[in-house]
Image: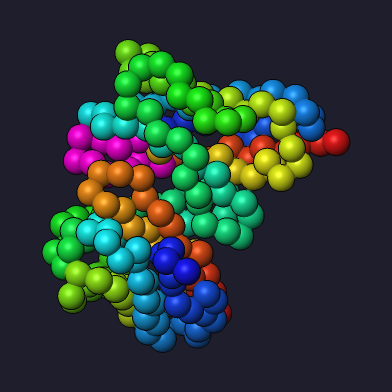
Amino acid sequence: GQNIDQPTEMTATEGAIVQINCTYQTSGFNGLFWYQQHAGEAPTFLSYNVLDGLEEKGRFSSFLSRSKGYSYLLLKELQMKDSASYLCAVKDSNYQLIWGAGTKLIIKP
Amino acid sequence: DTGVSQDPRHKITKRGQNVTFRCDPISEHNRLYWYRQTLGQGPEFLTYFQNEAQLEKSRLLSDRFSAERPKGSFSTLEIQRTEQGDSAMYLCASSLADTEAFFGQGTRLTVV
């Protein structure tokens, strides 16, 4: 079967750095996406990785290792508004998005 | 606003009633997806269209669910004979080919 694993919840301090991990087992791989979702709102796109390595976009970076079936999202200089769920999704061999359950990130002052 | 829009935002219905939701994707996007999401879970795939063709439907989807995209633009999702287990957020997303998907604000369905 296809599976995406991410921690259920993480807590971090305002101004700090946090890394949210995602491991996947899918039938094929055509890219990995990270989305942010605030409570009661729709997911919004953060990043896309299809090749191994680090993609940096402002305070957010995403890393991919296809051989390990592993990705992480790195959030720097955390702000209170970063409190949200972070969803990892993998596009499989049929180009369908397989979603993780999301990691709820709680930022404390 | 040129984003994905969904209507209605909220729907409360009695068990056994039929409901229909509408999604207007970003105009140039050829792919349209429907997902269902419950609290604490990621989006669950329901079905997707490429232009007007429905290319895939989740095997988890019962025959009470049907979706259309008649002219390759807006789409509707109908649930017949609603059950309490259908209560969820129904999300629509659109994309241009294999690029990232953009989501609408969702329709929250409550079946009482």
User: Would you say A54 lies left or right of A60 here?
Assistant: left
- Left-right relation of B67 to B104: left
Please provide percent x and percent y for residue A69.
Answer: 37, 20
Q: Is residue A93 above or below residue B63?
A: above
Q: Quadrant of residue B91?
A: bottom left
Residue B42, given in percent of the width and then of the height, sits at 48, 47
Query: Residue B23 in magenta?
Result: no
Residue at x 58%, y 31% (from the top left corner):
A58
Q: Position of residue B26 (x, y in %)?
A: 35, 63
Quarter where residue A28 is shown? top left
Q: Quadrant of residue A71?
A: top left
The count of marks equals 0
Query: Would residue B61 be visible to someone looking at this image?
Result: no
Visible in this render: residue A54? yes
User: Which quadrant: the C terminus of chain B?
Assistant: bottom right
Q: Is residue B102 above or below residue B86?
A: above
The residue shown at (76%, 42%) is: A80
Residue sitting farthest toward the top: A67
Which is nearer the eye, B27 or A94? B27
Residue A98 colored magenta? yes
Residue drawn at (81%, 36%) of the image: A108
Q: How is the image coloured?
A: rainbow
Instruction: Find the residue positioned furthest to the right.
Output: A109
- Considering depth in this image, is A89 or A61 the residue closer to the camera? A61
Q: Is residue B12 above or below residue B43?
A: below
At 45% from the left and 19% from the top, the residue drawn is: A54
- Residue stretch in magenta: A90-99
